Amino acid sequence: MARKKDETKEWLDADNETMSDEQVAAQEENDRRHAIDAIERFTNDEDEDEDDLGRISLRTILGGDILQSRFFLKQVAFIFFVVVLMLIYTGNRYSSQQDIIVIDSLNKQLQDECYNVLTQSSELTNMQRQSNLEELLRSIGDSTLLSAQTPPYEVK
């Protein structure tokens, strides 16, 4: 590789020796202009007369050629960002729906437990009535407790 560079340098030096200084300067200026023009062609996107999307047809869309247009190449980061947001939105919605299902299930379970507590409370209240207690004691037959035959009175 170094040998090739040396040969090219020798050839250019030999070529420059046959040309006058003015011709060498003109050649260098011409080469510099060509380099600048080439750089501008590759870096300047506004000079193209072609539409951003190019020629759009069903074949370019189905074939995927439209994805190579300048418009899509410039917007790759934005498109990626939008796709990520869509995935996050979809995942968030799915998660929210799962949470709503769990909340509804827990609410139903809580309501069932409330009904059970109310039922047990009313049964306990019913069992604590004096008449039910007396009946329970009579059925056991083990107790000497009896109901009072005289009404209570107030001591002054």
Image (cartoon, rainbow, N blue to C red):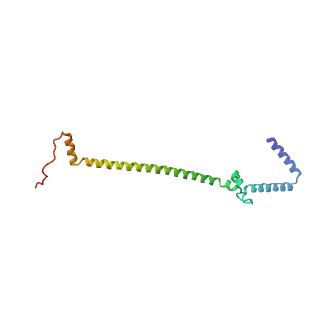
* Occupied quadrant, residue 34: bottom right
Is 119 on the left-hand or right-hand side of 16? left
Is 102 on the left-hand or right-hand side of 78? left
**Nearest to the observer: residue 24 or residue 146:** 146
* Residue 93 picture location, percent across and down: 52, 52
**Nearest to the observer: residue 28 or residue 89:** 89
* Residue 11 picture location, percent across and down: 85, 46
Position of the N terminus by quadrant: top right
Residue under the image location 49 percent in, 49 percent down:
98
Outermost residue on the top side: it is 142
* Residue 89 picture location, percent across and down: 55, 53
Is 93 on the left-hand or right-hand side of 69? left
Is 85 on the left-hand or right-hand side of 124? right
**Nearest to the observer: residue 125 or residue 78:** 125
Residue under the image location 46 percent in, 51 percent down:
100
Position of the C terminus by quadrant: bottom left
Number of marks in the image? 0
Outermost residue on the right side: it is 18
* Residue 130 picture location, percent across and down: 21, 48
Residue under the image location 85 percent in, 48 percent down:
13
